[in-house]
Image (tube, rainbow, N blue to C red):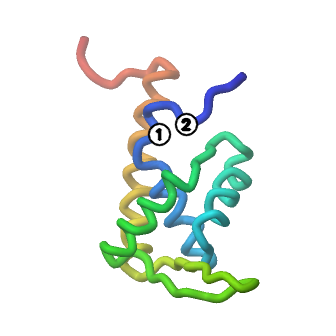
Amino acid sequence: MARTNPDFMTGVPELLILRLLTEREMYGYELVQAIETATGEAIKVGEGVVYPILHALEKQGCLSARRKPVNGRTRVYYTATAAGKKRLGVLITEWQRITDAVSNLVAGSVHGHA
């Protein structure tokens, strides 16, 4: 059985959450499902991972939240702000830099001195 979410996944949920919330507003559990679907089930995060990130991003001004009644209960829907979109750009740039470096090393083309 393939292991999901290895240790090097730190920071990835934040990137995925911001990316999804630039497309449309969603509530927490909806994000849990969307991440799983969008990654072909390669990445699975629970609400215990998603909600602290949502709250931190909202506190930083990267997300806005609004309460919406749905079937007799209130859900909090989040969407990326301009600051969140800027943060996403930074995270994507960093992710690409790191994945390119790791891919080069794994492929055997090491740039440096022995």
Q: Which amino acid does label 2 sit on?
A: Asn
114 sits to left or right of 99 = left
Q: Position of residue 21 (x, y in %)?
A: 56, 72
Q: Residue 62 carries which label?
A: none
The front one of 99 and 38 is: 38
102 sits to left or right of 79 = left
Residue extending farthest front: 72
Q: Where is residue 66 in the image (x, y as percent from the top left)?
A: 52, 87
The front one of 37 and 87 is: 37
Q: In which quarter of the image is the N terminus?
A: top right
Q: Residues within 10 Å of mark 2 (few under 14, many from 20)?
A: some
The front one of 21 and 68 is: 68
Q: Where is residue 91 in the image (x, y as percent from the top left)?
A: 40, 57
Write the residue at 47% across / 40% down.
9
Please say if 51 is above or below 72: above
SS assignment at label 1: helix
Write the residue at 45% across / 82% down.
64
Q: Quadrant of the C terminus?
A: top left
Residue under label 1: 9
Q: Residues within 10 Å of mark 1 (few under 14, many from 20)?
A: few
Write the residue at 60% across / 72% down.
27
105 sits to left or right of 21 = left
SS assignment at label 2: loop
37 sits to left or right of 109 = right
Could you tell me if the residues under marks 1 and 2 are in contact, i.e. CB atoms within 8 Å?
yes
Q: What residue type is labelled 1?
A: Met
Please say if 29 is above or below 85: above
Q: Where is residue 42 in the image (x, y as percent from the top left)?
A: 67, 40
Alpha-carbon distance for marks 1 and 2?
6 Å
Residue under label 2: 5
Please say if 63 is above or below 96: below
Write the residue at 58% across / 50% down.
46
